[in-house]
Amino acid sequence: MAAEDLDLVLRHTDQVVPRAELENRLESGERLRVKLGLDPTAPAVTLGWAVVLRKLRQFQDLGHTAVLIVGDFTARVGDPSLRSTTRKRLSADEVNAYAEAVLGQFRMVLSEDNLEIRRNSEWLGSLDMAGLLELTSAATVAQMLERSDFAARYDEGSPISVMEFLYPLLQGYDSVAVESDVELGGSDQLWNLMMGRVVQEKYGQRPQVALTVPLLVGTDGVNKMSQSLGNYIGVTDPPNEMFGKTMSIPDTAMGEWFRLAADLDPDVVEELERQIADGRLHPNEAKRRLARAVVAIYWGDAAATAAETEFDTVFREGGIPTSMPEHHLGPEDPVHLPSLLGGVFGLSGGELRRLLDRGAVRVDGRVVGGLEMPRADLVGAVVRVGRRRFVRMVG
């Protein structure tokens, strides 16, 4: 393998264990099976997930087989990584709904070539008691308590269920089932990935290489990107929304976003950071370049340019978008705004009331203060909620 291919695989990585083993496998010309497991616990594929998905795509482009595991079984157990309490369990119906929602989104990042998509219920759902006991013999309780989050909870006297101990073993069994050579994950997954090596050795397989990538901070610039926190951008978000949300991130997060969300070459990012630091590049212009790069990955250069133009129309010039969704009003009169806009934008009644109280809801540019409006005043009007949400009401 050429040196530039190895550089591509190692670009923007966090840890590779053992690194020399990965280099040897790549240099040997072996076609590797590169595994990535993602539990469908929410309906969107975020830019945070896309970081590791793009790493998987890089392996595909180099001729290796991408094995994407949809963790429809492990999602019902719940990954305890970075948890201080036991995670709420999801039902099978919830997990299946999320799985169906994300499958098409994965293909916005991955190639159809060299791709296997598997659900781990294929093998975990049929694992009998004898098989489960065999699996649990792969690790000791002492090994489990070497994990920092388990150790902290144990020291604090916080409950740790046996089921949570099973999660990394089940993830490791996934590696056995698909004969993984390399497993990818976020930086919070290293312990789980290393347990996969232990489980593979237990079953007589060559242990996989663990490769992790950093976790992308969300649009708040503080917490990792999460759908539960609402600080995320989805890969299917429309170009205008993706551009606007990216422009909202704090300046301090730009370097990380250039590396992980825009996937720019490290040398390019370092030069951008130098230019910002010495005043040659204004942070706003740098953020525009970032937003264009992020949108272009998923929607193309033309869409990125159009999104920037739309952003200027709406935010710099105080105008309204050239295009927006339409919503057909029902027969109710007067119209209860929290119910109407909650359905349109997926916001709770409480969130809508807070926005109304702050004067953040406008109808044809006029601030709305009450909870109800005559239906006639809404027909044909443009409703703006906050800074980026627009809808045209149709009678």
Image (cartoon, rainbow, N blue to C red):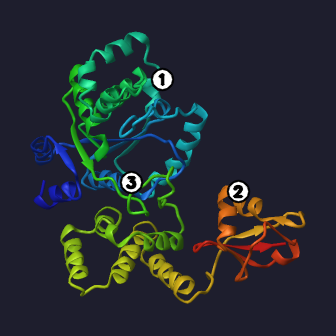
For marks 2 and 3, give the CA distance.
Answer: 26 Å
Q: Amino acid at mark 2?
A: Gly
Mark closer to the observer (2, 3): 2
| Quadrant housing residue 357 | bottom right
Residue named by callout 3: 224
Q: Which numbered dot is residue 211?
A: none
Q: Secondary structure at mark 3?
A: loop
Q: Residue at x 47, y 81 (%)?
A: 308
Q: Quadrant of the C terminus?
A: bottom right
Residue named by callout 2: 349
Q: Secondary structure at mark 2?
A: helix
Sequence-first tag of 2 and 3: 3
Nearer to me, 131 or 336 = 336
> Above or below — where is 66 with respect to 50?
above
Q: Residue at x 40, y 28 (%)?
A: 158
Residue 389 is left or right of residue 46, and the answer is right
Residue 251 is left or right of residue 362, and the answer is left
> Residue 56's spot in the image, x, y percent?
31, 50
Residue named by callout 1: 125
Sequence-first tag of 1 and 3: 1
